[in-house]
Amino acid sequence: MTTRTPRYTGVVPPLVTPLTDDGALDVPSLERLVAAQLEAGVSGLFALGSSGETIYLTDEVRDQVLEVIVRTVAGQVPVMAGCIEPSTDRVVVRARRALALGADALVATAPFYALVSDSEIDRHFRLVRGAVDLPLLAYDLPVCVHTKLSPAMVTTLAQDGVIDGVKDSSGNDVEARQTMLALEQHPTYTHLTGHEVVVDAMLLAGCDGVVPGLGNVDPDGYVRLYTAAREGRWADAKAEQDRLARLFRIVAAADRSTAGGNAAGVGGFKTALALLGVIRSNQVSPPLRRLDEDERKRVAVELEQAGLR
C-alpha cells in the first residue's frame, strides 16, 4: 500500500486583489490581507486566480501583485501563481515571470477561446511543464474555460509527472471522486477543492485541501474546518461548514441584474473585507461594478450573523 504524501494540503485561499478607488493596486491593503491569512494559519496562498481578478489585470499589475505577495509571505507558506491565459505560449510567458518573481508553484487552465481537443489540452500542459521547472497544478474551471478536464486526462498527466495536482473548481463531484480514486495510490498527487460550501464532504471523499474564495473573508473558519476534519471531528467540521455556508450568502448581496457572477462573488468578498477593515476599498476591475451602499448593508448583516462583526 502506497503511503500518500500529497505535495500540498490544507487551506490555500485564492487572494483577492485590493484596488484603490481609482483602480490602482492597493499595496498596503494587499499586505494586510496576506498578513491576516498567515495569522490565521493557512497552508498556502493562491495569487492571481479568479478571485484575484487576474483576467482583468495588466501584466504589469500582475507582476506587482505577485511581487508583493511573495515578499510579504517571505517563505512562510507556498505561493501558487495563476498563469491564466488562452494559449500555451502566453501561459509560458506568465509562468517564467512567476518563477522570476519567486512563486513556488504554477496554476494553469486548459487553453480557452480557441476550440481545442483533449490531445491539444494534454500537449498544452506538457509544454508548460517542460518550459518552467516549477510544480504545476491544473485548474479545472469549465464554467470559464468551457472545457472539463476528464479523470482519464488528469490521471495520465499526474502519472507522467506533468501535473502535481488539480485545483478543482468544476463543481463536478462525481468526476472529482473518480479522479481521486484513480490516483489514490499516487504518492504525491494533490486534489484541492474549490467547492467551498461542501469542503467537509470533499475532505471526507479524499480531497487534500481547499482553495476557498470565502477564505479571504474568514480564513480562521476554514482552518478550523480543515483541522476538525483531519482530526476526525466530523460533527465539528459540519458545524463550521454550515456557518461558512451561511456566510457565503454575501455573494448573493449584489443585484444580479447589474452585477454578473464575478462582480457578485469578488465584489461580495471585497465588500466584506472592507467592512472588516482589512482592505480600504471594495473597488473591482472594469467592466465590473463595485457593490453599492444597500448591497454593503446586506453583506454587513451576513458578517454579523456569522460572528465576524
Image (cartoon, rainbow, N blue to C red):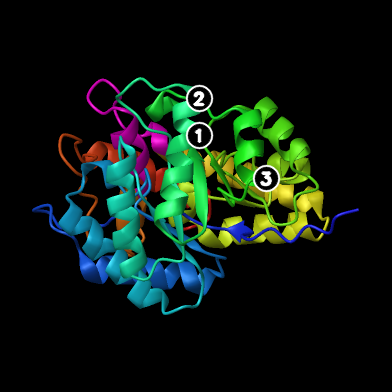
Looking at the image, residue 7 sits to the left or right of residue 67; the answer is right
In the depicted structure, whether residue 204 falls above or below residue 274: above
Q: Please give the residue where the numbered disc 1 appears in the rendered image.
A: 122
Residue reaching furthest right? 1
Q: Residue 274 versus residue 17: which sits nearer the camera?
A: 17
Label 3: element kind: helix
Q: Which quadrant is the C terminus positioned in?
A: bottom left
Q: What's under tag 3, amino acid-wise? A: Gln
Q: Which residues are magenta?
A: 251-269
How far is mark 1 from mark 2, CA to CA? 6 Å
Q: Residue 162 versus residue 282: which sits nearer the camera?
A: 162
Question: Where is residue 277 shown, x and y percent of the image?
Answer: 32, 64
Q: Quadrant of residue 100?
A: bottom left
Q: What's under tag 2, amino acid-wise? A: Asp
Q: Please give the residue where the numbered disc 2 appears in the rendered image.
A: 118
How far is mark 3 from mark 2, CA to CA? 17 Å
Q: Residue 246 versus residue 136: which sits nearer the camera?
A: 136
In the depicted structure, whether residue 147 falls above or below residue 26: above
The answer to whether one can see residue 14 in this image is no
Label 2: element kind: helix
